Amino acid sequence: MNRRDWLIACGQLAGTAAVGLTAPGCEPPPTIPQLPQAGLDDEVTALPPAYLTATFEPREDSAIAWFASGAATVAHVELWPDGQEDPQPVATVELDAATGLTAAVHLRDLTPGTEHRYRVFFEGAGYGPWLRFRTAPPRDAVEPVSFLFSGDVGIHAELDGAFGVLAAQEVPLYFHLGDWPYADQAPAAYTLSQFRLRHRSVRDPYAIQEWLWSTPLVAIFDDHDVKENWAGMELADEDPERLLTGLRVWREYFPFAGEVAYRELRWGRLAHFFVLDTRLYRDRRDPRRDRWKMLGDAQLAWLTAALRGSDAAFKIIVSSVPFGFDGYEDDDWSAFAADRGAVLDVVRETRIEPLIVLSADRHWFAARHLENGIREYQVGPLTAGLGKYPDSFPPNVVASALVRNFGRIDLDADAETGIARLTFSCRDIDGNLIFTERAESQLASR
């Protein structure tokens, strides 16, 4: 495989595993048969671990319905927007070995700021549970929102209660910042079947599934989803098949629309999220450290332009690795000075204050107040093992905790003053408060 083929394959991240996610060029869905007559409270017979369902990427007018089975079957999806009298069939999909018995259906043309529910009928098993999600409000709306974020999951059955704590938060979004299946833990995954088995084993638990029925995900991968501390350009030289296979299966279980993993998401006038791919385009092969790249030219140009052009009250970068540490293992932003400097230039020139950065990877919590008013909230692990503190903290760390944790951000605004407010809180997996602080920003004038 040459460099061009690798970039094309990685950029697409095996998008053919989903229905309606890589248009144009997709085949139209088959004719949808009439589903069995069923009411809102009909019996649920397709449940984990044999049948899995989840929602991804809720936006103004779309979301992604994801589902999986334990054996080849045909699945039918029906959608029931709030206020509609009856559910409507929207897709029929075959689940087979080609996509690892998973499927993703893009639910389109939805009404902004509206509650929706949908369910999947699996032939031979019956209906799965209703899944609920809320579409984002229109771009010009000021609608309060709360969301959760964390990273680092793994298999820890004794900690499954954490997912019930997350579900009880009742938020419309959860951002996952990488390291869910720990595919590189011994025995490490290399083949398609090995990666699929690792993902399936950490998605099966009933507690996780029950949480996902009510909480949509926006996810990005990190190192342990493929190989510890990997950099895309280096791994493409060393083991391109492992790289492509790992990312292909990751996308089977964490779908998103489009051809690249970096993307943006708006929540009205309050929040503009920039989800970054900090792994695939990394290049540390130049002996001159100041020329190392984390995001690649295209992603960096997209990010800086999008930050400059955003009129949201809070610009929020979603990064799997910390923005403000001190070069630990050459793996965070401080080892990539040019990319970090380009972001800082935008912050200074456009007077973004505060820029909010969400990060994970270190397996302990830290809140940082960085240069130019940047605030970083490093969270995790959620249920994976704890890390260890560095020998010393830089003075920008205003709070820390060596516990399993997750972050929550609440956004609202005062219509009279035009002041938007952000409240961050970090909680342990029993729900106990660890740290909280607030920030303000000005709503753009209309």
Image (cartoon, rainbow, N blue to C red):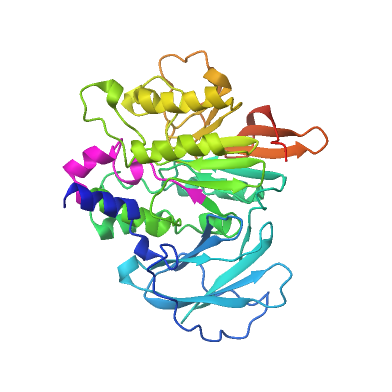
**Above/below status of 405 relative to 347:** below
- Residue 109 position within the rendered picture, expressed as x and y whole percent measured from the top left: 59, 66
- Does residue 228 belong to the magenta stretch? yes
Q: Residue furthest right?
A: 416
Which residue is at 31% across, 45% downward? 226
10 or 23, which is in the foreground?
A: 23
Which residue is at 80% across, 32% downward? 417
Give the position of the C terminus as an image quadrant. top right
144 vs 297, left or right, is right
- Residue 232 position within the rendered picture, expressed as x and y whole percent measured from the top left: 28, 41
Q: Is residue 262 visible?
A: yes
- Residue 387 position within the rendered picture, expressed as x and y whole percent measured from the top left: 42, 29
Which residue is at 38% across, 55% downward? 251
- Residue 312 position within the rendered picture, expressed as x and y whole percent measured from the top left: 63, 39
438 or 284, which is in the foreground?
A: 284
- Does residue 44 belong to the magenta stretch? no
Q: Residue furthest front?
A: 446
**Above/below status of 223 relative to 388:** below
- Give the quadrant of residue 408: top right
Q: Is residue 161 visible?
A: no
101 vs 140, left or right, is left
Question: How many labels were placed on the picture?
Answer: 0
282 vs 239, left or right, is right
86 or 383, which is in the foreground?
A: 86
Q: Provide the residue span drawn in magenta.
A: 218-241
